Amino acid sequence: MNFYKHHLGDYDGHTAHLSWDEDMAYTRLLRAYYRREEPIPPSEAYRLARASSKAQRAAVDSVLREFFAQGEGGWRNKRADEEIAAYLAQAETNRRIARERTVQRSVHVASTKRLPSHKPDTRSHKPEESKSTPVASGDGSPSAGNGTGVAYIPLNDGSEHPISQADADELGKLYPALDVLQTLREIRGWNIANPTRRKTKSGVMRHVNSWFSKEQNKAP
């Protein structure tokens, strides 16, 4: 354990009668108990408390008799055993949740890769621009955009930068924990809401990749 609860009121209430040496001995024994997650072996009690003088060793003996009980494996502290058991149970729960999330992400990525491509078939004809679906411009009004894409990011000059299907596929490979289209919608929404902070044509993809990177780091 790297952390354990130390309730000052409880501790002071139970140890106010201890001498300086006894208080130090008890504190050091508790730290060793939690760090090792096991009882204090009788043969190591002085060493774990770093008690070298006769008075310090007498203090160790005193607190062992008062706050510990000899049992299987050595000197046991009931409160410490309860805290360690709760910690180990929570750690196992956290590992189980992490495993489940990993499986869910794997299933999501696999299902995303199976989605059909929406690239237009250009073998026999070119897509008619007049039939393309308008998208919202920087001020929220319909606009045809600056090309064919799965999403459009408003730029500082009032135009919009198209994110192609190939760009979206590459983003999906680089950031597998994210829903690419939903994240692009969020980037578009942010730029619509912040017109003075929009990027130039040369800087917009750096903006997109930076956004994806931050969201990936936040993903569980």
Image (spheres, rainbow, N blue to C red):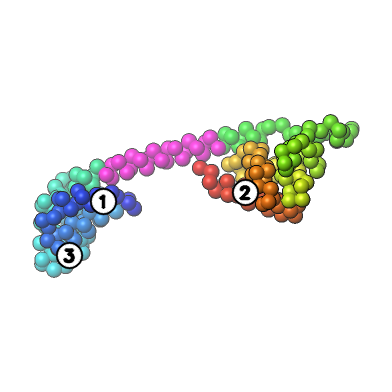
Question: Which of the two marks, 3 or 2, is nearer to us in this view?
Answer: 2
Q: In the rendered view, does 127 fall on the left or right side of 158?
A: right
Label 3 belongs to which residue? 51
Near mark 2 (Cα within 10 A), the count class, few <14, some 14-19 or many ≥20, is some
Residue pictured at 62% horizontal, 47% vertical: 212
* Residue bounds of the magenta highlight: 83-105
Q: Which residue is mark 1?
A: 6
> Which tag is nearer the camera, tag 3 or tag 1?
1
Q: Residue 167 at x, y = what percent?
A: 72, 44
Q: Residues within 10 Å of mark 1 (few under 14, many from 20)?
A: few
Residue under circle 2? 211
Q: Amino acid at mark 1?
A: His
Q: Secondary structure at mark 1?
A: loop
Using residue 216 as the reference point, say whether residue 188 is left or right of it.
right
> 86 or 114: nearer the eye?
86
Estimate the spatial distance between the alpha carbons at disc 3 and disc 2, rounded to whole Å: 55 Å
Q: Residue furthest bottom?
A: 53
Counting residues from the N terminus, which is met first, the one under dot 3 or under dot 1?
1
Among numbered discs 3 and 2, the one appearing first in the sequence: 3
- Of labels 2 and 1, earlier in sequence is 1
Q: Nearer the viewer, residue 209 or 207?
A: 207
Magenta segment main secondary structure: helix
Residue 159 falls left or right of residue 35: right
Q: Is residue 130 above or below residue 83?
A: above
| Residue 29 picture quarter | bottom left
Gap between marks 2 and 1 measured at Cα:
41 Å
Under mark 3, the amino acid is Ala
Please give the name of the residue rendered at 38% of the width and 40% of the height, measured from the top-left corner.
92
206 vs 131: above or below: below
What secondary structure is found at the residue carrying circle 3? loop
Q: Are marks 3 and 2 in contact (CB under 8 Å)?
A: no
